[in-house]
Image: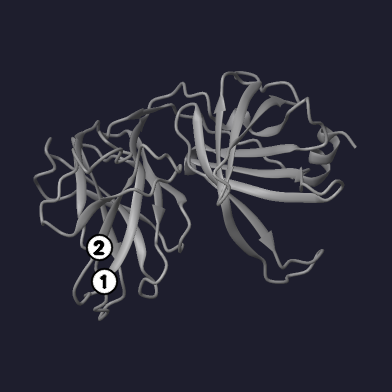
Amino acid sequence: MKIATRLLLYFAFCLLLANSAAAQSELLTNPGFATDLSDWSNENNRPAIWNSRDASNDPASGSAQLTNVGVSNGGVPLTLSQCHRVNAATEYGYGGNVLVPANQPVDTSAQIFILSFASTDCSDTSVQVDAIASVAVETWLAIGGTLFTANGVSSIRISLGVLKPGGESADAQALFDDIYLRRADGGGMINERLSGSWFNPATPGQGFFLDISPDLNLFFGGWFTWTTTPGQIDWMTVQGSYSGDMAMVSIFRSSGGAFNDPATVSSVAIGVATFTFSSCTEGQVTIEFMGTGSTTVIPLKRITPAFPGC
């Protein structure tokens, strides 16, 4: 069965999103903690060190390791931060890759906060506060959110911290990498018009069905492929945030379900997929499964014609 027919049968419920997409312009400096924590402020001198673990397994880069020490009051001791000038009444996307190592106190979570201010240097009382978090253990996950700045806002502070339950005295750690703060200003290659069926013509019978939501800064896809055993079907999903012409998202494999049955399904992150697009009909995805140390690049072409306006 051709991939176009296969994907249409599986996803006849596909919805075309109507909101305009946004290109992204990075505001942060040293967002990937390439060699150190430079350009990030630690005004309260809380525990933060550079760690060689990198979300993309890049041996030339690393991440920020933050530690919540002492008895917790249930709050988040914000540690590293950056302040940047922004525009009022404008949408900004923020997020990054986070990892909570094994053997942390129960319910430890990596937290990314964003606060807006009327001042130009984040010095007064915050006007807006928003946050995203992840409690995943030993798995890099891409998390992201958006904030529409209020009238009168002139600056934004993005801050990183680690949450542990109230009363917990054991140290709790989390890693942060590829943090971003970007203005949505139109023109990015990745937008809702890329939603649909994509495959590699050289390997028919497998491919991706993508669903992209600018409102959520969400890049989601169903991946229909095969295992290394001939004839054995494998179905995975990809999910995460995106920026401009690139989406670096987690790969998940699910198990435990049954046909038309409410059986509990569990999903485990097994790798990272990086999608890039050169046009509305051509792109590629780089696949890296955990523990393999190798990558696979798959060229992609859109199966159906591009949407009007793409």
Residue positioned 68% across, 45% down in the render? 222
| Label 1: how many Cα within 10 Å (few below 14, some 14–19, many 20+) | some
Q: Is residue 239 left or right of residue 6?
A: left
Kind of residue at badge 1: Asp
Counting from the top left corner in percent of width and height, residue 194 is at 62, 29
Q: What SS does tag 1 mark?
A: loop
Q: Which image quarter holds the C terminus?
A: top right
Counting from the top left corner in percent of width and height, residue 23 is at 43, 26
Mark sitting earlier along the chain (1/2): 2
Kind of residue at badge 2: Thr
Counting from the top left corner in percent of width and height, residue 286 is at 58, 34
Residue positioned 27% across, 39% down in the render? 35
Q: Which residue was labeled with disc 2?
A: 67
Return the residue nearer the eye: 113 or 80. Answer: 80
Query: Is residue 247 something one can see in this rendering?
Result: yes
Residue 171: image tag: 1
Counting from the top left corner in percent of width and height, residue 130 is at 31, 52
| Label 2: how many Cα within 10 Å (few below 14, some 14–19, many 20+) | some
Residue positioned 14% across, 50% down in the render? 42
- The span from disc 1 to disc 2 (Cα, nearest Å) is 6 Å
